[in-house]
Amino acid sequence: MAADMRYAASGMYGSAAYDLNRYGNTAVQEEYELPQEETREDELRQEKLRHRSEAIREARRVQSVSVAAVLGFLVVGVLVVLIMLSYIKLTEISGEINTLEGTLSEIETEQTKLKVEYESVFNLTEIKAYATNVLGMTKLTDSNTTVVTVQREDKAEILSDNSSGTGIIETAKEFISSLMEYLR
């Protein structure tokens, strides 16, 4: 039991096998060399592994995502977002149009009411009654006309205006100034 404790107390790091080459023992090395057939199989196995690893690398390269594909998907995503935003804006504008059409129909109804009221205020029969009853107007008859006779002949006189500069230029200036006053 004491011997077991001795081995347990001292730790062993590394391998417990003897290094036969250290002591120059080549006979043991020859004894453990593999025949050529086994090394050929190892070479074939390693070549298969190399081909397999190359095939895996090639498959990863083929399966990898290209930069153009990523950019294409990003562009498509941005376009989808822009289309959705335009549909939202279109819906908002449609709502505004509906509201404005409702307001327009209310204003047209009010215009029709005001037009009827305006026409009722200026009813011709009421105006005629007001003219005859209140103002004392009557229709024109032969008794209402008076013929005036003049003993002299008809003549026309041209009066001269004493103001100077009544030429075409002054008339144009007056017309332009009156037009400017009208436009103000």
Image (cartoon, rainbow, N blue to C red):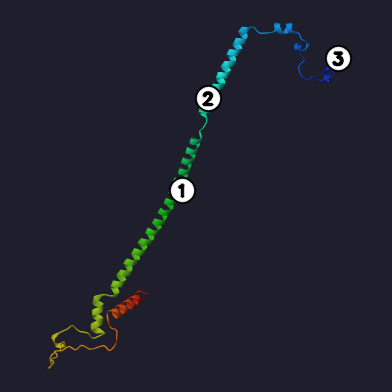
Residue at mark 3: 3
- Among all residues in the image, which is located at the extreme bottom? 151
Which one is nearer the viewer's eye here, 11 or 173? 173
Q: Quadrant of residue 15?
A: top right
Q: Quadrant of residue 56?
A: top right
Residue at mark 1: 85
Label 1 Cα neighbours within 10 Å, binned few <14 / some 14-19 / many ≥20: few
Classify 47 as above or below 92.
above
Q: Position of residue 166 (x, y in %)?
A: 28, 83
Label 3 Cα neighbours within 10 Å, binned few <14 / some 14-19 / many ≥20: few
Q: Element under label 1?
A: helix
Amino acid on which the number 1 mark rests in the picture: Leu
- Cα–Cα span, label 2 and label 1: 43 Å
Classify 178 as above or below 152.
above
Q: Is residue 129 left or right of residue 69?
A: left
Q: Position of residue 142 (x, y in %)?
A: 13, 86
| Residue at image location 62% in from the left, 10% down from the top | 39
Residue 118: mark in rendering: none
- Cα–Cα span, label 2 and label 3: 59 Å
Q: Is residue 128 left or right of residue 152?
A: right
Which comes sooner in the sequence, label 1 or label 3? 3
Amino acid on which the number 2 mark rests in the picture: Glu
| Residue at image location 45% in from the left, 43% down from the top | 79
| Residue at image location 46% in from the left, 46% down from the top | 82
Q: Element under label 3?
A: helix
| Residue at image location 24% in from the left, 82% down from the top | 131
Q: Nearer the viewer, mark 2 or mark 1?
A: 2
Residue at mark 2: 58
